[in-house]
Every structure is written in structure tokens, then in C-alpha cells.
């Protein structure tokens, strides 16, 4: 079969239940489903066509406008090319994960949306009393209990980031966070309608690997990684997570839109 014939053949699809609305907009949920069902699963290869809009509407039980919004997101993330009269064509996956700093989303979400597999290793749960630094970051009294969640994030089975999250125990149900955790603390809290997570203040700066971090991320000692210091707030302005993240720059590309202000 030649390449042009291959591009015009979409896979047979089977109708599935409609997507959940918890924590995500419907188009975001549909785009995530498309990535999982057809791209990261490798059901489709680079150059293959996605199912048609009509097929996707039937598969996910959503409107055509929802499917079009989902397809637009996949296009903007560089996962597909859209050609009039042809359809949406799967593109080769980039090694790096683009991360929009103006969007509150987890590493897992960005990885999945860009066609990569996200995983977790070396997961640790601890509760510690707040010291002076945690007291300042989380705006709680010294000595208050803090849930500490540390883990290694994997992208396509390779070490990509070391993450430590600190959560004030008085704001979150720690047992519920553990039960619902699937790799991202942020995703758990974003799905909690009672917490009303709203925004984050973040700073990115270079960090030189010492021996423990170099061993964790499998990088040479003394090389630079990206350090992300981020505090997530609810609508009342209360800190719900202080996150410390060390990122292997070979796996992440940060981008933001700079606007003109008169």
C-alpha cells in the first residue's frame, strides 16, 4: 500500500461511553481520550488518519463542535496535521513535552496530551510538622501537620522529573488524596469541587545537579536542570500545594505567550 492510500484509511471504531466531566472541560476530555485510544496506544502510526469527525462524535457520544475543539487542541499541541478534504493525520511525536506556563495542569496531563506515556516511581508519603519555610509557603503555623508526597516522574519510561509536593493537612483529606492518586497530586485536587483550586504562582530557574539528584534523574553530576517552584492556590487565595520540581530539560520545553501592553 502506498503512502497516499495509507493516509486515507481510518481505523474502525467502536462506540464507548461518554467522557467524564470531572475536573476537565468536555473537549479536553475528548482530546485526552483520542490520544490514549489512538496515539499513545500506537493503534495509529505517524501518517495514519484519525477517525472522521462523525465517527468520533459517535465513539465519544459528544457533539461535532466538541470534537472540533478537541481536534484543534491536538493540532495546537503538534500531534496532528489537519488537511482540508483529507482529515486529521497523526504526526511523529516530538521527544520534548511542551509545557505552557500560563496553564495550570500536571506533568501527567501535558505528557498525555502530547502523546507520551507518564509514569511514577519511588513514591513516598509522609506527614511532617511545618518548619519555618513550610509555615511561610503554606501560610500555616509552625508545627501544623503537612502531607509530603515525593516521587520520580517518568516520561516514556525514562526519568524526567523529581517532584515533591507539600499539602496543608487541614485543607485536604489525606486519605482521600492517597486513594485517588494516579500520579499527580494536582490532578486529584483539581478534581475536588470543594477545594476550588484556581491558580498558581510559579518560578523557573536553573539548578545544578548534586550527586543524589544526578543519580535520580540519571544525569551527570554538575549539569543543569530546570527547577520549578510553584504554589497552587484556591479561589480564596489559600495555598493548597507548594510544589518543588526538578525537571530534566531534555524532556521539557517551556513556552508562554508574550503580549503587548500599551
Image: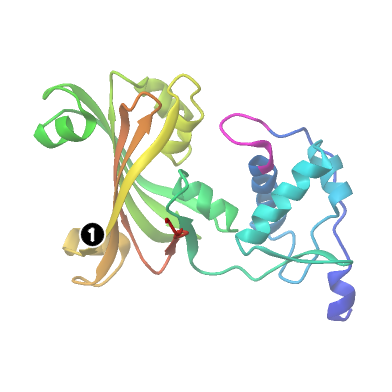
Residue 197 visible: yes
Position of the N terminus, as image quadrant, is bottom right
Magenta span dominant secondary structure: loop
Residue 41 visible: no
Q: How is the image coloured?
A: rainbow
| Residue closest to the eye, 260 or 178 | 260
Q: How many marks?
A: 1
Q: Position of residue 137 (x, y in %)?
A: 20, 35
Question: In the image, 14: left or right of 117?
Answer: right
Pointer 1 residue: 213
The image shows residue 167, relative to residue 64, as above or below, that is above
Determine whether the residue tagged by mark 1 lies in a helix, strand or loop.
helix
Question: What residue is drawn where x is 31% and y is 26%?
Answer: 238
Question: What residue is drawn where x is 20% and y is 70%?
Answer: 221
Question: What residue is drawn where x is 79% and y is 43%?
Answer: 65
| Residue closest to the eye, 45 or 71 | 71
The image shows residue 136, relative to residue 70, as above or below, that is above
Q: Position of residue 199 (x, y in %)?
A: 41, 37
The image shows residue 85, relative to residue 135, as above or below, that is below
Tell me which corner region of the image, top left, top right, bottom left or bottom right, holds residue 210.
bottom left
Q: Position of residue 87 (x, y in %)?
A: 83, 63
As for residue 72 lying within the magenta part, the answer is: no
Q: Which residues are magenta?
A: 20-27
| Residue closest to the eye, 204 or 3 | 204
Question: What residue is drawn where x is 35% and y is 64%?
Answer: 248
| Residue closest to the eye, 152 or 107 | 107
Amino acid at each position: 500500500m502506498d503512502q497516499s492510500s495509507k493516509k486515507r484509511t481510518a481505523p474502525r471504531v467502536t462506540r464507548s461511553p461518554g467522557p467524564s466531566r470531572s475536573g476537565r472541560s468536555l473537549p479536553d476530555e475528548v482530546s485526552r481520550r483520542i490520544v490514549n485510544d489512538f496515539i499513545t496506544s500506537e493503534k495509529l502510526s505517524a501518517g495514519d488518519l484519525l477517525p472522521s469527525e462523525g465517527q468520533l462524535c459517535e465513539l465519544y457520544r459528544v457533539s461535532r463542535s466538541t470534537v472540533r475543539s478537541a481536534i484543534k487542541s491536538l493540532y495546537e499541541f503538534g500531534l496532528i496535521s489537519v488537511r482540508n478534504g483529507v482529515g486529521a493525520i497523526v504526526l511523529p511525536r516530538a521527544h520534548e513535552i511542551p509545557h505552557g506556563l500560563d496553564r495550570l495542569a500536571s506533568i501527567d496531563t501535558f505528557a498525555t496530551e502530547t502523546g507520551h506515556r507518564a509514569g511514577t516511581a519511588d513514591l513516598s508519603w509522609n506527614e511532617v510538622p511545618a518548619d519555618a519555610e513550610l509555615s511561610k509557603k503554606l501560610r500555616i503555623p509552625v508545627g501544623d501537620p503537612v502531607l509530603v508526597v515525593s516521587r520520580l516522574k517518568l516520561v516514556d519510561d525514562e526519568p524526567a522529573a523529581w517532584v515533591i509536593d507539600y499539602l496543608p493537612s487541614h485543607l485536604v483529606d489525606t486519605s482521600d488524596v492517597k486513594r485517588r492518586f494516579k500520579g499527580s497530586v494536582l490532578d486529584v485536587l483539581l478534581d475536588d469541587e470543594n477545594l476550588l483550586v484556581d491558580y498558581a504562582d510559579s518560578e523557573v530557574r536553573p539548578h545544578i545537579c548534586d550527586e543524589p539528584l544526578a543519580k535520580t534523574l540519571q544525569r551527570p553530576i554538575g549539569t543543569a536542570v530546570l527547577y520549578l517552584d510553584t504554589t497552587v492556590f484556591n479561589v480564596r487565595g489559600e495555598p493548597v500545594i507548594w510544589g518543588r520540581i526538578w525537571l530534566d530539560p531534555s524532556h521539557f520545553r517551556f513556552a508562554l505567550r508574550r503580549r503587548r501592553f500599551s
